[in-house]
Amino acid sequence: MLRIVLFLVLIALAAAGAAWVADQPGEVVMTWGGWRASPTIPVFVLLLGVFAIAIVLLWSILTATWRLPGRMRRRRHDKRHAKGRHAITHGLLAIGHGDTALARRHAEAARRHAPNDPLALLLHAQSAQLEGNRDEAQRAFRAMAEREDTRLLGLRGLFIEAQRADDAVGAVMIAEEAIKLSPSSTWASHAVLGFRCARGDWSGALAILDSNLSAGLIDKPAYRRQRGVLLTARALELETMDRDVARESVMQAIKLAPTLVPAAVLAAKFESEAHQVRRAMKLVEAAWLANPHPDLAEAYAHVKLGDSARQRLQRVETLAAKTPANAPGYIEGRLVIARAAIDASEFARAREALAPYVNDPTQRVALLMAEIERAEHGDSGRARAWTLRAVRARHDPAWTADGYVSDRWRPVSPVTGRLDAFQWQTPVASLPSDKGATIESSAFEEAMLAAPPPKRVTVVPSDSPAEPVVTVPDPAPAAQDNSPPTGTEEPAVATAEPAEPVQPAPAPAESTPPAATPVFRTRADLGKPAPVPIPAVIPIVRAPDDPGIDDEGPSDEFTEQIGTPKAQAGGWRGFWSRWGA
């Protein structure tokens, strides 16, 4: 409404001006050479207006003509840019759903229409990666690294390509250059930190960690924990070379990360050597409550040098009592009690500690039971049976990081380079599965655990070929002798001529063992229920690309094994060996 009123006002003013000019008397005389004109004032004003309009139109035409090439260039550029953006958009979508040919076609179109667009370079590099053309991808990433706006992205791409080519030196150099450009770059700081830890450059790793804290990449609690991990790694490396620096490092680490197991073990060792027994015990107890670990129990047991085995057993029992019965690490306390009891020859106490776990044992439980049978009674048969159960028993917790299982703690994961990745937990491959098939314990195993060692039966020939002298086992089943057999038993002699002395037969050769009364079930009985039920165990299936285990070794499966048993062969041969075939 306001615009309409303003327009009407302007028209009214123009009409009033025109009327005023028309009412003006007089004329204007113009002389130029021999030409003379004398129009009236209204005509002169009209001619002046027409002339002004003509000048403006002429100027506009000249200006448009002058700017026409530039406008045509801009129009072509905008058209090419629109085609390039269209190609980039659809090319990235093609990469997203894995269409290699379509992505390559759009990448070529984007390079033609928008060669200087950073997204066109990214599309070209990613399409080359999708095709597996590493040389082309590296050229594209190098072009991006030379530009100011895409330098960091180009370095990231070159870093990934160097990792794919197993060029560790080139990868770390690229990551260090990226850190110089952007200290807050997460991938670069992570990569440099992992590489420095892998080289054992703990001072450089600590410097990177401080830089991460300053850049805001990690918070204060994570910084304290990771700094404690790096200090612990440095202390473990310098323990045998520079004990003063190692002690100083581990004492700083235990303040930053009091629940870190290797830091608590090493700090307790140094405190014990300095006769600070009470402080060493407090360090171990604090770590034990957070993460029960056998190394902590070992350090706690030997916190006083020169103690007897029974004193170490009492100290370990005190430590294990601090773990609640429903805690996940309660079994660790029972295992360390059993270990200390075996060392102190307290076999009843060791059996009592392992009693809740013998029906479904882990590998450590089975090996401890085998050691108890061998040390207490000298029963090699039952010890071998427990050793066989250890082969197929559930795995115990181990240091695990990103699916990698290590026999010792490490500061970084060898798979991803992640700091403080190792955790004391059961490996994923050994966890039970609801759908997995189970393997029942063999009859051989059950019989060895259920039956005592049989007495030997020896056939002794008499002087008369028709009347052999036969020794028989003790018929009384209640009197069982678990001690290992020593030579030939006292025979009960039955002969036709008791007055005549019987000459004992010479000892048989090792290659022809004496005949024995069968105490094991035959293969035909394997399908029947076992007399002593033993819970089934979950097998650990070997990966298809695993070449297996060398089957060399003693051919006699009854050969006594000391320590950790060797893994059995795979395939059908290993299957039959487990059944005693």
Image (cartoon, grey):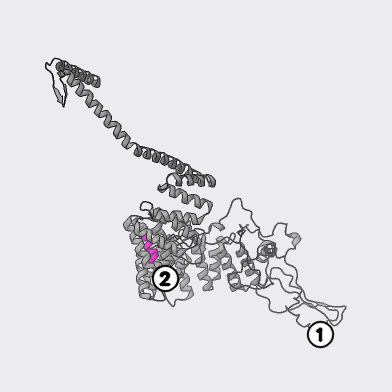
Camera-near label (2 vs 1) is 2
Q: Which quadrant is the C terminus positioned in? A: bottom right
Q: Is residue 241 above or below residue 72?
A: below
Q: Is residue 445 magenta?
A: no
Q: Which residues are magenta?
A: 224-231
**Residue 501 found in image quarter:** bottom right
User: Can residue 212 be seen in this snapshot?
Assistant: no
Within 10 Å of the Cα at label 1, are there few (<14), some (14-19), or many (20+) other Cα atoms?
few
Amino acid type of the residue that numbered disc 2 sits on in the rendered structure: Leu
Where in the figure is residue 443, as x and y percent of width and height? Answer: 69, 62
Question: Which residue is at 15% across, 18% downward?
Answer: 40
Q: Give me the disc on residue 286.
A: none
How much space separates mark 2 and mark 1, taking CA atoms? 73 Å
Q: Give me the disc on residue 501.
A: 1
Q: Tell me the element at label 1.
A: loop
User: Can residue 230 be seen in this snapshot?
Assistant: yes
Query: Is 208 in front, or is 50?
Result: 50
Q: Which quadrant is the N terminus positioned in? A: top left
Where in the figure is residue 519, as x and y percent of width and height? Answer: 73, 67
Q: Is residue 542 above or below residue 22?
A: below
Instruction: Report the residue marked by disc 2.
Output: 236
What type of secondary structure mainly makes up the magenta span? helix
Q: Number of marks in the image?
A: 2
Question: Which residue is at 50% across, 70% downward?
Answer: 340
Q: Is residue 444 above or below residue 376?
A: above
Q: Tell me the element at label 2.
A: helix
